Image (cartoon, rainbow, N blue to C red):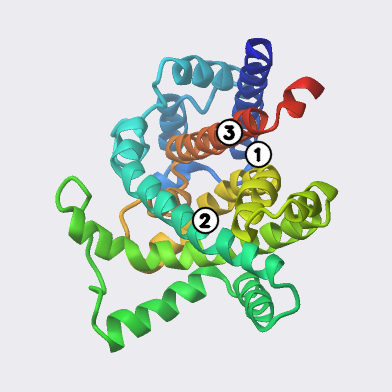
Amino acid sequence: MWAWIVGRMGGFVAILAAISVVTFALLALIPGDPATVMLGAEASRQSIAALHKDLGLDRPVPVRFAIWMRDAVRGNLGYSIFSHRPVSAMIGERLSTTLTLCLFALAVAVAVGVPSGVLGAVRQNSAADQAVRLFQLLGLSVPDFWLGILLLLVFSVELRLVPLVGYKTITESAGTALRFLALPALALGIVQAANLARMTRAYMLEVLRHDYVRTARAKGLAGRRVIYRHALRNALPPVVTVLGIQVGALLSGVVVVETVFGLPGVGQLVISAILTRDYPLIQGVMLYSAVIYALANLAVDLSYGLMDPRVREAA
């Protein structure tokens, strides 16, 4: 058991190392010069060269990468080129909003996706199943930002149930924060719920055909107990894996949704960093996002093994 966990942790560290290399290499290959962006197109060559030296851009790429990795291990991701503030502090100020939004969206996805998938499988080809399949089709076809704009028009502009702009953190006012996060969490969560419902329905249909389910029913067990204790329990491991993969989709979707709803999260931060070519800030945000995604997959991997001992034995 412990050897299996240590093996997964080793894989996690290797993934982080690979992510660091790819993140730095991608930004190093992007065309454009941050010094020119900061000083303007009319800046002299001497001024640009001096700024290159100050920012360390005159050094070879491998040297810059080694310095960046050394500082990143120490928790120092450098300073923003434009605000001159520590990148870690800037991300930390925005991270709580983004993580809270992602957690609410995941809660919506699980609360809607899993029960509807079970309903569709148990009542296959019924009107309820057709409704679930229509929900899956619409959810997978509609972009989350489009759904977010629609929700804003209906609940903020027409019905005036939710404020159109503004935000407060949960520590400042939990009730106000929930009101501002409700619509973006729905916009992100409903799209993910459609995918989760599709996967849950497919795996439940497969499990319901197994002999042990038929045996449980032949023994006279209640239908609800057969479905939730025998069928759903065995269908959950692959569904949990899909849920971990959806964390990546949430982290990418949150960039646009935060912009639509004006939330001060990491999504808005990365957009402003890209527009100004603030390389240290872009690298920091990409690294943080990759670490969160890798941690989510590690948690899913470990839970998958805990739910199904055959996974540990196979490993």
Q: Which residue is mark 3?
A: 294
Task: Kindly identify the residue that appears in the image at 32 percent across and 43 percent down.
Answer: 96
Query: Disc 1 or disc 3, which is closer to the eye?
Result: 3
Q: Which residue is mark 2?
A: 110
Task: Kindly identify the residue that appears in the image at 42 percent across and 26 percent down.
Answer: 77
* Quadrant, the N terminus: top right
Q: Secondary structure at mark 2?
A: helix
Which quadrant holds residue 11?
Answer: top right
Q: Secondary structure at mark 3?
A: helix
Task: Name the N-terminal-most of marks 1 and 2.
Answer: 1
**Where is residue 230 drawn, in percent x and y?**
68, 47
Q: Which residue is mark 1?
A: 29
Q: Is residue 276 above or below residue 138?
A: above
Distance between mark 1 and mark 2 Cα atoms: 39 Å
Q: Secondary structure at mark 1?
A: helix
Q: Is label 2 in contact with label 3 (beta carbons under 8 Å)?
A: no
**Where is residue 109 drawn, in percent x and y?**
51, 59
**What amino acid is at disc 2?**
Val
Camera sees residue 42: no
Distance between mark 1 and mark 3 Cα atoms: 24 Å
